[in-house]
Image (tube, grey):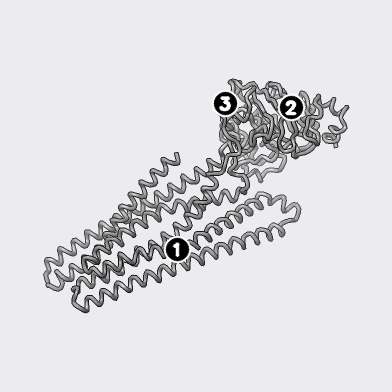
Amino acid sequence: MLRAAVGEQRRGVAVGALLGSGHQVGEALVPVLIGVVIDRAVAGTDAGALARWLVVLAVVYAALALSFRFGAWSGERAAVRADHDLRVALVRRVLEPGGGAEEGRLPGALANITTEDARRVGAVNMALMLGISALTGILVCSVALLRTSVPLGLVVLLGTPVLLWLGHLLSKPLESRSEAEQERAAHASAVAADLVSGLRVLKGIGGESAALDRYRATSRDSLRATLRATRAQAFQNGMVLALTGCLIAAVALLGGRLAAEGTISLGQLVAAVGLTLFLLGPLEVLASVNAEMAQGRASANRVAEVLATPYAVRAGGATLPRPVRGAVRLRGLRHGGLDGVDLDVEPGELLGVVATDPAHAAALLRCLGRHTDPEEGDVELDGVPLRELDPGELRTAVLVAEHDADLFEGTVRGNVAGAADGTGGASCTDGASGTGGPGADGSGAGGASGRPGVEIDAAMEAAGVTQDLGALPHGERTAVTERGQSLSGGQRQRVALARALAADRPVLVVHDPTTAVDAVTEARIATGIRHVRKGRTTVLVTTSPALLAVTDRVVLLDDGGRVADTAPHADLVRRHETYRAAVLA
């Protein structure tokens, strides 16, 4: 798809360059025609010839105006399309089920690359069109000067390559400083986004001043980098302009001397001076093109780094059996502190997992959702190792609902229905596809299992959202701001849980979904989850006794990252002190 877009952009640049070259040719012909008018009509007092040449001049003006208009439109269109296609490619890479692009990069930095860097790379198309047009104008000007006087033409033909080479050398500092400028700007954007998302927490702990100091320091670094890049650009522009002035002065002085000697006529002198002044435009364009190309190269490196980021997990060639039964098996799993975990989850089982170390819970979630492959051992779904599956296909069957899931802008119902209609499944976790769930109206195919799906209203009821709608100003149509900041912590948790339930995957893994709700609501949610997920494999990674009490059995992971015991919740409470400390403390 990206290759096809590149081909279309190249055609746009080619068309724009052709039309732009026509404009430059017309611009170069104007002083030549004026010289001809002076020699053949004005000097000879021939009114008829004057009228004819003025008509020719008017036609040339009309042609160069039209070619400029459509050439600029074609070049700008190619630049905007390139910007758009790059943004789409970057977002697609970030959202790839295989992951990896977000590693080591804050969301604000990725946003800056997707917007500002993509725009600068797209602008290279316009710069190329303008550069080709400017070179065409210089070439036509040189030929016209050669026909007038060989020395004049040679000065332009030999001086222009030297000028371009010097301009390229002068653009090197700008390129490096522009890259540093973009990196600092991306970091400042990332810090700003991070602070805004945690604004409520900062106000709660009185950390506004510390946060402001942090952003002020980051912003100053960005400002210094921008000023260094601006100084480099100003120096380059000034030096190129000075060199351009020297070339034009040389042509003008030589033309004046030839006219004084009688080597060229008055009309030819006027044409030579006009062509010399015309040269200023193309040469200035080439200077700006050099600057655009330098900035474009710096941004292109940053874009390429994201697009070329290795995938966190690779797609395998295996496929899941249909329908998916939901049998999950862990064999000798070693990852992130987990040490040889063996576990079988039967199809339709409601399993609780208690990890005494939160890092072990996080490692288990990453392996079950295949955001990473285990260092040793395997995780299997219906007998197929997850590492042999395409991550996108896996997430039509397995949904890992993280504890800190974000909401999207829209409405409460829209956030819940998003997972069901395939537009919001990723928001439940970290990139899981939303395809395969029921429709937004609650009547769908039910995902990979083929059974009837969970209705939106049923999911909202089970997650405790329905009971909470009375406290919202517009019920289920209440607007939700970015990341759900307009809702309380408990409301966000319940909406995110309802979204995960509405997705109706054959296997659902939920991490601490009720930490911000009261005990009565938590008990009601526990009953709702068991009811809605009946016959579907569900893993609750939690230390909530209310949730663990409704599970079929509970697996205890001790501090060593191993399975210490497995039994119903009540039995573990009676016989395991470590379990009691983790769950009842």
Mark 3 or 1, nearer chain start: 1
In the drawing, what numbered circle is on residue 567? Answer: none
* Residue tagged 1: 169
Residue 337 percent across, percent down from the top left? 74, 37
Mark 1 or 2, nearer chain start: 1
* Residue tagged 3: 318
* Residue tagged 2: 342
Q: Is residue 260 left or right of residue 124?
A: left
Residues packed near mark 2 inside 10 Å, few (<14), some (14 to 19) or many (20 plus): some
Q: Is residue 257 left or right of residue 238?
A: left
The amino acid type of the residue labelled 1 equals Leu
Residue closest to the eye, 163 or 233: 163
The amino acid type of the residue labelled 2 equals Asp
Dividing the image into 4 quarters, which one contains the N terminus? top left
Residue closest to the eye, 304 or 358: 304
Q: Quadrant of residue 413?
A: top right
Mark 2: secondary structure: strand
- Regarding residue 379, the answer to whether it shows in the image is yes
The amino acid type of the residue labelled 3 equals Ala
Report the residue at 65% width, 52% height from top.
Answer: 196
Residue 384 percent across, percent down from the top left? 62, 24
- Regarding residue 439, the answer to whether it shows in the image is no
Mark 3 or 2, nearer chain start: 3
Q: Are marks 1 and 2 in contact (CB under 8 Å)?
A: no
Residue 520 percent across, percent down from the top left? 79, 33
Residue 29 percent across, percent down from the top left? 24, 62
